[in-house]
Amino acid sequence: MNQQTLPWKLLEHPADIRIEVHGKNVEQIFLNSASAMTSIITGTDEHLEKLSVKIFFLQSDSLQDLLVDWLRELLFLFTVERFVFCDAFLKIDETTAIEARVRGYFMEFPDQFRDGVEIKGITYHGLLLEKTCDGFVAQVIFDV
């Protein structure tokens, strides 16, 4: 993973993995957070051709809750179905709902990503999602 060219970076954390993500808008924050999580899980930024599509709708009480729910849904798809996120078309409305058309692929074999880190969950601890002068910034901690 080449940290210098990515819209996210790893931050120090004593026990888990903490990331900071930047984006021009909320949709980019969600996409960049998902890409960061996928890179951590798989240990790579290079993935196969996007062969499969998953469509889902989520609704939460706040944008921060929606970000956590979005990442949890993608983590569920990876853990249970072995579906690897590549990219997505997102429609996020002001009432904290997301309609997602996610593109990715299914892992070929269980230990395909030996260099990755197993993420057990997404926490609310230290969660940040706020507007900045350049767009938006988010911080998320992954329980490993």
Image (cartoon, rainbow, N blue to C red):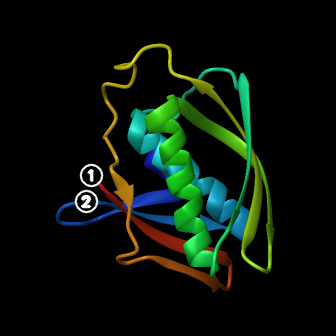
Q: Secondary structure under badge 2?
A: loop
Q: Measuring 50% from the left and 14% from the top, which residue is drawn there?
A: 108
Horizontal placement of 106 versus 89: left or right? left
The disc at residue 144 is 1
Name above or below for residue 8 compared with residue 89.
below
The Cα atoms of the two marked residues, 1 and 2, are separated by: 6 Å
Q: Nearer the viewer, residue 132 or 85?
A: 85
Q: Earlier in the sequence, mark 1 or mark 2?
A: 2
Q: Position of residue 53 (x, y in %)?
A: 74, 33
Where is residue 39 shown, x and y percent of the image?
46, 41
Count residues near mark 2 (Cα–Cα under 10 Å), then give few for <14, some for 14-19, many for 20+. Answer: few
- Left or right of residue 56, residue 136 in this image: left
SS of the residue at dot 1? loop
**Residue ID for mark 2:** 16
- Residue at 53% from the left image edge and 72% from the top image edge: 138
Q: Residue at x 39, y 19 (%)?
A: 112
Do the numbered discs 1 and 2 sit on residues whose CB atoms are within 8 Å?
yes
